[in-house]
Structure formats: structure tokens, C-alpha cells
Amino acid sequence: MNTQSNSDGALLQVTGLNTRIKTSRGELRAIQDVSLTLEKGEILGLVGESGSGKSVTLRSLLKLMPPSAEISGSVKWQGRELSTLSSSAMRSVRGGEIAMIFQEPMIALNPVLTVWRQIEESLHAHTDLNRKQRRRRAIELLTQVGIPAPESRLDDYPHQFSGGMRQRVMIAIALAGDPRLLLADEPTTALDVTIQEQILKLLLNLRDELGMGIIFVTHDLGVVAQLCDRVAVMYAGRIVETGPVNSIFRQPHHPYTQGLIASVPQAGDEGTPLLSIEGTPPSLLDLPQGCSFSPRCIHSTEVCRQRLPDLVKLSAHQQVACHHHLHIQQQRQPEEV
């Protein structure tokens, strides 16, 4: 159930990833049977409503979940299995080979340490540079992410930076270990559109310059269209559709994907009411039998309520998990002619 058929030589290959979290109210099935691949220099978007499992997927890849979480499945990084690595071996992978940008920099950054101290910590852990070299490298990193006058800003504290600049600092820290994979957890959510545009261009430039793979978590389909090569749509902890961005946007096969795209304002639709997906996502503590989207789906039938759909191939690069995707597409054809 990989998100693309040819996974040979993939930078990252995830198969059957599951994360279950024990809570006082029972076991929460945060992500279920998630499989995906990522090639060098590729940007994969993970999209879905809040609570769909996007952020948990990233944290599970790096074993950053709390002790109450049980993670199973295979995570192969450049052919090396991460799921069986010791804690010390995993620490060398985090930051050095795979880095993560967290959603809210004001929370992720330490408010009582200067930017220099926080960048140096990563450089000290993942490079052999001496202190003078680390200082020079920190200035280079701030320059690379577009912070003006980096020499004078290096000894400032996080609260002395704007939201967009704090996010750039987070990216600089992530780049300190020269990673080959960047996990970005909604890094533009709290930013205004102008700063968001700058951050997206920065990530694209870094991908082109460094050849990094990027997994970008977002709920904004506009960002996906602008930034990503492929997209995986998540709902209630599962991937329900995946494929190249152009293919998914042009011809979505899953009713949930169709609903997400229909809810985005389109040029020329001024004055037209936006469509919405009725209802709310199910609780991960009490998922419905069969397809989790069936209570909200206008195409739902008895088979949807009884049996979980498999993620099946539509083409070499596109997959969907829906019992009625062929019927849904046949209904859409006359509208598209």
C-alpha cells in the first residue's frame, strides 16, 4: 500500500505504520496502516482536517511520541530500518539525517536561550566543528534562511524576532546537521500570507539547492498546489487517497478529497456559496466500523458501513481507498465534458 509503485531506491519507505496511544478513556488509534514513499528532492504533502493523524505520522517516524504510545510497522530510511534502532542510534538520525520543523516556533524555541545557543546545540551534536567554526556556520545558516544582518541577530532571544523570522530560525536549526529529509509540521499556519509565501519559496529553494526530500503537513490545499509534487490525503488516521498533485486536483477519486477541494474558493466563483463537508471527523477512540468517512459521505452504502476499503491502485502513481470510486467517477464525467 505504498503511495507510489516504484519504491526501489527511495529515500524513505514507510510500510504499515501504526501508532496507538493509551489514555484514561481507552486506546486511541492515532494512525493506522500508513504507508508512503519519498524520493530524493521530492516534496510530499500530507493533508487533512485537524486530528486526521498528520502530525502524529511525522512524530512516529522519528519516535518522538510519548511513552504511552505504541508504534509498529516499518520505517526504512535510505534502506536502513529505523524501527529497530536503539535510542542512542536514533538520536544521531534525528537532526543529523532527518530534521523536523515544528508548528509553533514560539513554543518549540527555548525562550531563555539565544538563537546562537540553540543553533550551536544542533551543530555541536551533529558536526565536528569547533566553537569558532560553529559560530561562523550559524551565521551562514541564518543568511541561508534570509535573516538580515545575521551577525547582529545571532545573540538575540526568540521574543526579539517576528513570527516569520522565528520560523526561519527554526528552519536554520533544522538545517544545522545537513539533513537529507525535512519534516515540516504546518510551518506556515500562524503566518500572514506574505510571510507564508516567503517561507514556501525558501523551502523550494532549499530543496533545489540541497536536494532534500520534504514531507509537508498542512490543511491548506493552496499551499499543496504551490509547493508539493505529490499529496497524501489523511482521514481518521488513514491515508485515503494519494497521487501527483496535478492528478489529485484535476480528478479526485475519494469523496473526502472531493469535499476538501470543493471547499476551497476558486477564481471566478465570487458570490457562490462554498461547499462544505457535513458533520465532523469521528473520535479516534471510537471509530465506526467500515469506512471512517461513511457517516459523512453522500455516497455511503451498507458495504461502506461494514467493510474497510483497501487502498487500491488507480494508476502507477495514484491510489484511493473507496468502495465506490469507479461509480463516483462515472457520475462526475458528464460534468467535466
Image: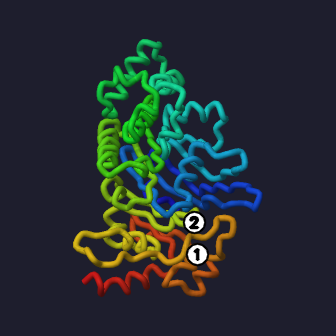
> Tag 2: residue type?
Ala
- In the rendered image, the vertical position of residue 281 relative to residue 230, given as above or below: below
Left or right, 256 with respect to 193, comes to right
Q: Considering the image in quadrants, where does the C terminus appear? A: bottom left
Residue 288 image position (x, y, % from top left) = 65, 75
All told, the count of numbered labels is 2
- In the rendered image, the vertical position of residue 287 relative to residue 189, given as above or below: below
Quadrant assignment, res 146: top left
Q: Mark 1 points at which residue?
A: 291
What residue appears at the point 34 percent right and 73 percent down from the top-left corner? 251
Q: Name the residue under label 2.
A: 236
Give the label on residue 5, or none: none
Q: Which residue is more in the foreground, 281 or 124?
A: 281
Tell me if residue 126 can be seen.
no
> In front of the other: label 2 or label 1?
2
Return the disc, 2 or 1, that comes first in the chain's sequence.
2
